Image (tube, helix red, strand yellow):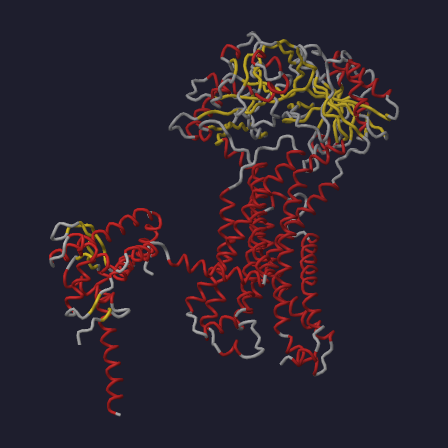
Amino acid sequence: MSEKQEVWQGTLALMTLKTIETMGPLHGFGIARRIEQVSGGRLLVNYGTLYPALQKLEQEGYIAAEWGFSDNNRKAKFYRLTKAGQRRIKDEERQWAAAVEMVGRFLAEGGSR
Amino acid sequence: MTGRSWRARLAATWGKRRAERQIDEELASHLALAADEFERQGLGREEARREAMLQLGGLEQTRESLRDGIGLPWLENFGRDARLAMRNFRKNPGLALAVTAMMALSIGATASLYSVVSAMILHPLNYPGAGRLVILKEQRSGLDLSRFVGIRLLRELQRGESTMESAGMMGRDANVSGDGLEAERVMCVATQSSLFRVLRANAQAGRLLTERDDQSGAERVVVASHAYWRSRLGGRPDAVGRQLMVDGLPHTLVGVLPASFRLAGLEVTRTEIYVSGLLDESRWKPPLVIAVAVARLKDGATPEQAQAEFQAVANAHPSRRGGASRIGIEYWEEDLARDARPPLSLLSAVAAILLLVACVNAANLQLARGLQRQREFAVRRALGAGSRRIVSQLLVESVLLALAGAFCGWVLAYAGKDLLTGYLSQRLPEMPPVEMDLAVLWVALATGVFAGLLFGLWPACNAVRLDLNEPLKEGSRSSGSRAVRRFRNMLVAAEVGLSLAGMVASGLLLRSLLKLEAVDGGFRTRNVIVGTVDLDRYRYATSERQSEFAAKVLEEVRRIPGVEAAGVSSHIPLGGLVWSMSDIELEGRAKPIPMTEVGVATASYFDTIGIPLREGRGFGASDVRGAEEVAVVDGRFAELYCPERGCIGLRFRHWSDDGRMVRIVGLVGEVRLSPSSERQPTLYRPLAQEGMFHLEFLARSSRQDLRKRMAEAARRADPGQPMHGLEPLEARRAKSLAPKRVMLALVGILGLLALALGAMGVASVLWHEVSQEKRAIGIRMALGADAARILRREMMRGMSTVVAGALAGSIWGWLLAGWMKSELWGIRTDDAGAWLAAWLTVLAAGAAACALPAWMGSRVEVARVLRTE
């Protein structure tokens, strides 16, 4: 089943932050490409929603941006994680795990019937 | 939203252009990077670009959504809340209007009244470096010259090796005439050239006084104020160099001062002229001539150093009788502000009362509004509104109301200020320009807005914590928890208390004024008209000539039909301040009597103004120059200095240095120079013997307006000596009390406003309670309570708050009364009449305020109320 899925609502922020955490400072295009790669090409990042998400994260202080140059010498805006961003990742990871566990339990119950 | 993103967005809102450019650049860079990728995958350049565009899913949409993200979404929320708030206001406009009006009124009234009054009382100096100016004060043994210095001492101070420059000035009226200028009384300031250096004034045209002008025998010169030059000399530049006759002596106008120059320290009008020769003693009659002396401190010098320096000079030149004088030094601005402080602080206290009452009232209304809406909040919460949203919506409402109140208050403050200034300047010729006192305005604004916000929010917070069930129950009363109700009653009680304090202040002022008006000055004012002539010192140099002139005028005045009596004195009650005092060496007393008022009068003066002759004789036609020198003394003099054997027959010596002895031949009644002044020992000398330049003509007549005819009489005697200041003595008496009256009016108005607002508060709270309790009242009535009983109960409830407030307010009133002591005359701060009146007024207002809601309660229709259940 190689049907491509769009990134789920609400998870884009977490993925973005996590991507920046693992990759270090990165520009928007790089983040999108990375998310697609990590998902094994199964996730399709909607570029039209990526940039507003980045903007929001920046305004809220989870990431900070600087202008720099890419590997192939293109001028680009690079995002890096802030302290608040690192905290946010931890929180979100915990919540995500809790949600997954809860949904899993729910499904397990349903399956046993 | 974190503070950080707030800042980021706010910054972005500011630099919106820049942020938009960055968005474009970022998207462009994205496209470039994506195109690079596609190119690497083997697409052609153009194709790669198109592919990248497609992948982005619409460049324009992305850009738009990014742009929308720049601003502040809470602004949008605010907009939504604001629209909701406006809908609420429209639905219930009364309350919103009341809150706004209350705040606007308090802010406007407080700021405008305070600004106008402070401008009237405070006269800030407008000279460059005014903060370094000091005023000199002399104190002699047994005599405090308050703001003045004797000119003999001043001369010594200036002659010494003083490191700082000082200048004396003395104001008086002078007869000024000239080519094409009718003879007229003009305020003439006798001064020295140093005055303009000390005050750092420059001439607008011509020159100011120079040291050469100070020397005796120099050409007589005069400097005109800008207003005099404009109004009398036509504002013409060629006026400099003109000849003016000042008191019969030719003077040359050498210069004009700029319009910005205003002399402080003397009671001068703005059309004044300046002449040199203050220290020329030959011009002045009594030995003690005093002047206002100011000096400029050197850089770095302290007033203490200056005092020590001046004191050393004073010690080196003791006066013949009294020893060395003590010199006091004070910053001029502080000295000028001191008189203004007690009335200003009283006024600010009362203004603060009004402001507080209005704020409390606004707060109370807000609380009431909140309480009424408890159900609305509960419904909204039950439907899932977050508590944050409810609070934020209420906050927005409160902010809007506060802003509206603040804005209207601001407008009202400026409008009120202009209105008051315009009104007053038509009546007071010397009304200064009024600047808004921004400090007071800001304090008023801040207090009003703060109170509005605080109490707008409180019910919201209450609502958030509220048990949802309670307000949702059908027909439940929403007058809030017991704590809130108690708090509202406390607020109302505080309002009542504050208004009581205001009423006490007004009552005390009123009683004090009534006392002053009832003072028996020892003379009659009814039907007495007074007019002043200041004789030309040159043409009327001798007492013979002076008394000849007076006799001529009196003869003319007596000829006017209806005139019953006419007389002259140098020294009349309610007259201007005439310093004419002398040490008296009385026979049989070892030490001279210091500084006794010496008046000069004709025999007919005492009869005209109704001062009775108690013993001996009055002045007669034989009391002329060459005959025995005589005097009469007043009761106070006799009481103080010859209590046992009486004064009549005693002889004394006064300021005349030739050693003439004067015999006391009569004793007359004593007068108070002004209603509030102490009785001063006074002696009178006949005009024919003593002579005087300053003559006050009095005429008694039942006919109404004598003014024109009296002026005419003086003109017939000598057209060069105009009579001025003609007015009924009653008017002078009224004028002398005018400041007290203005104070009373202001305090009274503020106090009554506060009381009215307080009464509104009482009424609104009771109204609210009654309307919430209709059901309970209905049940009680159904069980047999009659309307009168309900009425009584509700009245009692309202009045208990009023009485509690008044009791608390008595303490504030007591504090305020102690504070305003210096504004009172003849009564104590615990004056029963004033306190009783204040209490009665407040109780009456409270009862009136309770009456309507209580009546409404008693009119509850049982059937209707119970049916709605």
Tell me the residue at 67%/50% (across/down): B507
Query: Vertically, is B245 above or below B708?
Result: above
Q: Quadrant of residue B813?
A: bottom right
Query: Vertically, is B114 above or below B446?
Result: above
Q: Residue furthest right?
A: B561
**Which quadrant would the N terminus of chain B be assigned to in this image?**
bottom left
Report the front residue among B690 and B446. Answer: B446
Left or right position of A46 against B308 = left
Report the front residue among B770 and B47. Answer: B47
Report the front residue among B794 and B679. Answer: B794
- Give x and y (percent) for residue B492: 59, 62
**Number of marks in the rendered image:** 0
- Give x and y (percent) for residue B506: 65, 49
- Can see residue B310? yes
**Which quadrant would the C terminus of chain B be assigned to in this image?**
bottom right
Report the front residue among B480 and B225. Answer: B480
Q: Quadrant of residue B666?
A: top right
- Can see residue B288? no
Query: Vertically, is B378 above or below B458?
Result: below
- Give x and y (percent) for residue A98: 24, 77
